[in-house]
């Protein structure tokens, strides 16, 4: 018996025909084929419904960062606004961006603090690689990625750094890339040189390694950046802060609920776009970690 006859006998073809005719009732403007739903499924009470595993939701976030003109425009917008505000910040001795800086800073030399990942360096190729390979973030693959020094620049970042340096403003990079020894290398923090090399590949020669402060470089330097900002604010007047995460600006927010974080954005509303510049990053961040699981429960419909 050939396969066609067997399928006919088993009733597979009639079933397929039925399915196809049902599909034709779907709206015509579907971009992708959609699975056809059975006509009338009995509705189970919410409590009995199986919990769906969370989908890998980084695809569109990473595509947006890699292809959307709007992403580039937002990054440019942040850095250009900052450049336009630099002279005002320099002229006003009472001007400081750091919450950690409260007194006796008026005569200190000026500085700005920038986060690194998704603020100065664009790691979307690493994120894209994870999606392509069906992998999750791991310290090992991340450390391998940063050792390649192949991150691109976030649009506008290097122009701003050059403009600030030209005006005599010291530029510090405060990052949560972690200092960790690597096999076969003597340095305690090769990750610092990775940033220097990466910037050099982007045409930014000789960025001083001493102006880069990484997580774990000192015992008390954890993910919270407040201590590093405080240390810099003892010696410099901090004109501006740049980052893609709320913790790049405000201390103690990494575990706060999203509602509390939103309140803090409002509390400090006069700082955004003047002393604080946030870069778009829908791909990852502390915003995501506070959602809980399943994250879908945080959706607000109407
Ligand atoms: Mg970052």
Image: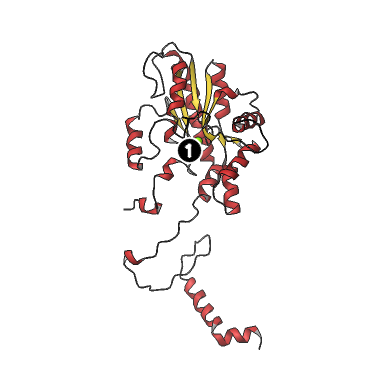
Q: How many marks on residues?
A: 1
Q: Nearer the viewer, residue 22 or 118?
A: 118
Could you tell me residue 182's position as x and y percent?
63, 37
Q: Nearer the viewer, residue 34 or 61?
A: 61
Could you tell me residue 97's position as x and y percent?
41, 23
> Which residue is at 40% across, 38% downward?
254
- Vertical placement of residue 2 versus 22, above or below: below
Q: In the picture, residue 287 is in which quadrant? A: top left
Relative horizontal placement of residue 109, taking residue 187 as reference (left or right)? left
> Which residue is at 42% across, 34% downward?
247
Q: Residues within 10 Å of mark 1 (few under 14, many from 20)?
A: some
Q: Nearer the viewer, residue 235 or 120?
A: 235
The residue that label 1 is drawn on is 280
Query: Residue 154, can we see it?
Result: no
Query: Residue 126, can we see it?
Result: yes
Name of the residue lying farthest toward the right: 184
């Amino acid at each position: 018996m050939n396969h066609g006859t067997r399928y006919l006998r088993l009733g597979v073809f009639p079933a397929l025909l039925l399915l196809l005719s049902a599909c034709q009732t779907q709206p015509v403007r579907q971009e992708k084929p959609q699975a056809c739903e059975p006509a009338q499924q009995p509705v189970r009470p919410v409590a009995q419904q199986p919990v769906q595993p969370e989908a890998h939701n980084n695809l569109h976030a990473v595509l947006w960062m890699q292809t959307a003109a709007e992403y580039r425009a937002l990054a440019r917008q942040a850095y250009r606004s900052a450049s336009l505000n630099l002279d005002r910040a320099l002229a006003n001795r009472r001007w400081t961006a750091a919450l950690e800086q409260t007194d006796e800073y008026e005569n200190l030399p000026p500085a700005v603090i920038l986060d690194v990942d998704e603020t100065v360096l664009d790691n979307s190729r690493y994120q894209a690689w994870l999606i392509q390979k069906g992998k999750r973030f791991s310290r090992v693959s991340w450390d391998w990625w940063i050792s390649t020094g192949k991150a691109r620049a976030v649009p506008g970042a290097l122009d701003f750094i050059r403009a600030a340096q030209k005006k005599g403003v010291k530029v510090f990079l405060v990052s949560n890339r972690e200092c960790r020894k690597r096999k076969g290398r003597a340095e305690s923090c090769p990750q610092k040189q990775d940033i220097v090399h990466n910037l050099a590949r982007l045409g930014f020669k000789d960025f001083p390694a001493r102006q880069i402060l990484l997580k774990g470089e000192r015992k008390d330097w954890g993910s919270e950046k407040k201590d590093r900002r405080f240390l810099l604010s003892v010696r410099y007047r901090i004109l501006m802060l740049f980052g893609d995460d709320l913790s790049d600006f405000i201390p103690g927010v990494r575990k706060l609920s999203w509602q509390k974080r939103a309140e803090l954005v409002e509390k400090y509303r006069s700082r955004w776009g003047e002393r604080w510049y946030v870069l778009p990053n829908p791909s990852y961040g502390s915003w995501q970690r506070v959602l809980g699981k399943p994250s879908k429960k945080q959706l607000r419909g109407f």
